[in-house]
Image (spheres, helix red, strand yellow):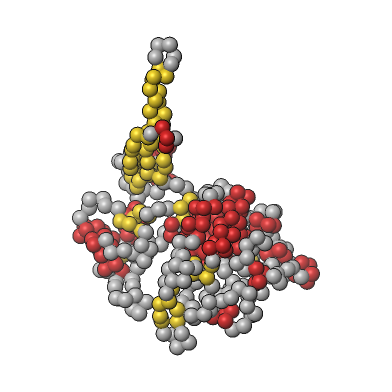
Amino acid sequence: MIPPDKTVHNVSNYPHPLADHSYLANRELWDDWFLSGIAPQPAPAFPQAKTQEKVAREFFEDDVPLPVARYLRVDTGERIDALMGRLFSGGIPTQTAVDEIASHLRVDGMFNVNSTSVEAWKAVLGALRDRQIVTRNENGGESVKPADKTTPVANIGAPFDSVIDDDANMDAGQWNGRRTLSDEEIEELAGALVKEIRKRGPFLSLADFVNRRVGTDTDLARAGAIQSALDDDYVSINKRQNSGRSVTDSVANRFEFPEAEEGAMNYGGPSVVKQADILTPIGPILSARSDTFIIRAYGEAKAADGQIVARAWCEAVVERGREYVDPSEKATTPQADLTQDMNRRFGREFGIVSFRWLNPHEI
């Protein structure tokens, strides 16, 4: 009911404007909010109940992993008691904690969503391959199922221990089971996703990657890159579920954007692999830019007659850190509030992580 080039739309004879809530929520959550994982851990969801303050202290003091294990602490040299005193007051996070917690964390291996490498996307999409999964029985009892050489689809809730056959009829199992992805399906999805990235990129933010592309191109405006890849005719993951999707004449005559009504009849059920299912395990490591780069350089020496008498190649790995180029401004200072021209122009400081000389056969 909202045109493809809008996210808010007024409909005649309706008192309130309609909003594309998914688009607007994604824009806020992916670009303006950061979820650290430093949160209360209640039982029975966790083996041991912990307060938010205890989770933070164990992480910063003892390197106890957060739920997202690839979040690592940044050692600033500050005493733990001083840090905890600034982040918490009476067990409640302070406004300081809300504003600066991201500057105390780094991610082990961020992945740039602008990558057009099928092999790289296969590695990311198949990161859960051969992992155990928690399932529930009809009475709510939980059990851990052994790895089975496939990639489990990380739905939000623990499903029944019933792997859904994509070719099965729409029986009860389609609504309470779980999906797994084969290596072939991961490869299909990676290939289709790279095609979508080439079509839509470069993405300037994560929300830009997750959201549909607002505009007059109905193909891009219908869904985000991952969902469009899942719906690609080349991808067999939801082939059966999508087999009946079409735009009826009644919808086409009534709706501003009838193509957006296309989709699986049971969309939302566990049998349909959705963009949200794909994002759940990989969201914490995604980025719209790279922070680590490999730089190679070449030099040569020439004799008086112009003949090259020596050559040398070197390689450096550089990484963007938390501090600004001019350290007089705190790392937690928002970009819009920077006062130093050096920081406004160049942003965060890069440091050399490693350096080595290369042999000719490595070039």
Q: Residue 145's spot in the image, x, y percent?
A: 43, 76
Q: Residue at x 28, y 64 (%)?
A: 64
Q: Residue 127's spot in the image, x, y percent?
A: 45, 61
Whether residue 244 is situated above or below residue 201 in the rendered picture: below
Q: Nearer the viewer, residue 86 or 309?
A: 309
Q: Residue at x 42, y 42 (%)?
A: 293
Q: Nearer the viewer, residue 260 or 301?
A: 301
Whether residue 225 is situated above or below residue 255 in the rendered picture: above
Quadrant holding the N terminus: bottom right
Q: Residue at x 22, y 58 (%)?
A: 80
Whether residue 251 is situated above or below residue 105 in the rendered picture: below
User: Does residue 100 appear anywhere in the picture?
Assistant: no
Q: Nearer the viewer, residue 172 or 163?
A: 163
Q: Residue 135's spot in the image, x, y percent?
A: 45, 78
Q: Is residue 110 left or right of residue 55?
A: right
Q: Is residue 58 left or right of residue 219?
A: left
Q: Is residue 305 left or right of residue 352?
A: right
Quarter-wise, where is residue 230 in the image? bottom right
- Return the residue found at the far front: 361
Quarter-wise, where is residue 242 in the image? bottom right
